[in-house]
Amino acid sequence: MASLNKKSVDDINVKGRRVLVRCDFNVPLKEGKITDETRIVAALPTIKKLINDGGKVILCSHLGKVKNGPNEGESLAPVADRLSEKLGKKVTFVPDYNVTGEAATKAVEAMKEGDVVLLQNTRFRGAEETKNGEAFSKELADLADDYVCDAFGSSHRAHASVAGVTKFITEKGGSNVVGYLMQKEIDFLGNAVENPVRPFVAILGGAKVADKLNVINNLLEKCDTLIIGGGMAYTFLKAKGYEIGKSMLDESKIDYCKEMMEKAEKLGKKLLLPIDAVTIADFPNPIDAPVDTVVYDSDKMPADREGCDIGPKSQKLFADAVASAKTVVWNGPMGVFENPTLAAGTLAVAKALADADATTIIGGGDSAAAVNQMGYGDKMSHISTGGGASLEFLEGKELPGVVAADDK
């Protein structure tokens, strides 16, 4: 992986300069109201730093999937209101669906030092995600002198507002740097994988082996112990020749699982699989409905039952591995954690991490949701803000949004 020594907002002087900041304001909205403002709060340190340094701060972000073209339901207007409250100063919103253009240019021309402008949802442009993003990239760069990427959750996509814009900022002699949120992600995730304090334990869960192929492969080379739980563990158990009943199976990945178990042995790494399973007769409907469970050892599962969580022996095995670790990365729940009965395994792992004397990193997505719901959020060293981006980082891939920033 390329050096992660990137310039940050601390390395530039923005006084009197126009700074375009790509944030992740992809917040959940219900009837025009923001239901979870975590991402807005996470963006504040970088924004406040730039305001205090006398920059003219121009914010941009996408929101939602924007399948049906621009629409008020996915406008960033509610974000502008919430930001104004949080910053204690007016954030000027440019509602133009074109994002850049006359309205944006005028709003930026009228800015004084420390002012904040928020542009409309970048995906309203449509060109954001395509090869035609060039014109959009240039128009974004025309509004600013410097660029700050603080949207880790989007940094794995080479979009106009994430990576495309940097080329044009460089051409005009400006700086492309990362914000505090990006810096934290790079420091924790990057260092955990590239030069961890050992023993380094990686825990992977979630439903499908297919989603984590490259992650398993990359982490096996980097970690000392790899723990596998969740739905994908059953394909590994099947690869060992065990009966897994009606449990989730990725038939086409059995050989891959065998290869990975052989690789672990060859590299002298521990690969831990569940030694017991919490089984059910039928999947709960709705998903959080009460459900009857029976625990079986992993090599004694009946053919008519489905494994949906790790059992108490596995909980202890995994917790013991975590207890002796110095670095732990966790991505993916241990079972169907949406159901209170089938959340025990995920809860046990979260508790083991909370109690560990180690750097504990939660790789976004469902694990982050689980840790927060269970009240262990503040016990973790770092909870990543990007599901897909975290996974690609753990795969050892270079993220366009990180690569595009200037090196120190």
Image (cartoon, rainbow, N blue to C red):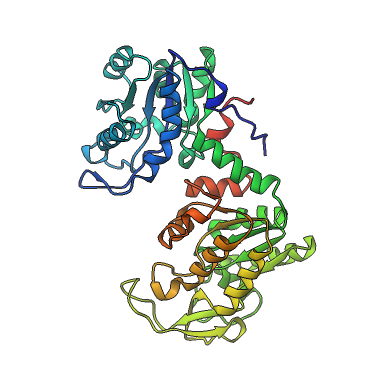
Q: Nearer the viewer, residue 350 or 157?
A: 350
Residue 383 visible within the image: yes
Q: Nearer the viewer, residue 8 or 27?
A: 8
Instruction: Give coordinates of residue 63: x percent, y percent.
Output: 34, 40
Classify the position of the N terminus by image quarter: top right
Residue at image coords 56%, 46%? 392
Residue at image coords 53%, 23%? 176
Q: Nearer the viewer, residue 388 or 49?
A: 49
Instruction: Give coordinates of residue 103: x percent, y percent.
Output: 26, 18
Q: Quadrant of residue 282?
A: bottom left
Q: Quadrant of residue 58?
A: top left
Instruction: Give coordinates of residue 141: x percent, y percent.
Output: 43, 19
Q: Is residue 140 left or right of residue 30?
A: right
Classify the position of the C terminus by image quarter: top right
Residue at image coords 46%, 39%? 154
Residue 132 visible within the image: no
Q: Is residue 343 above or below residue 164?
A: below
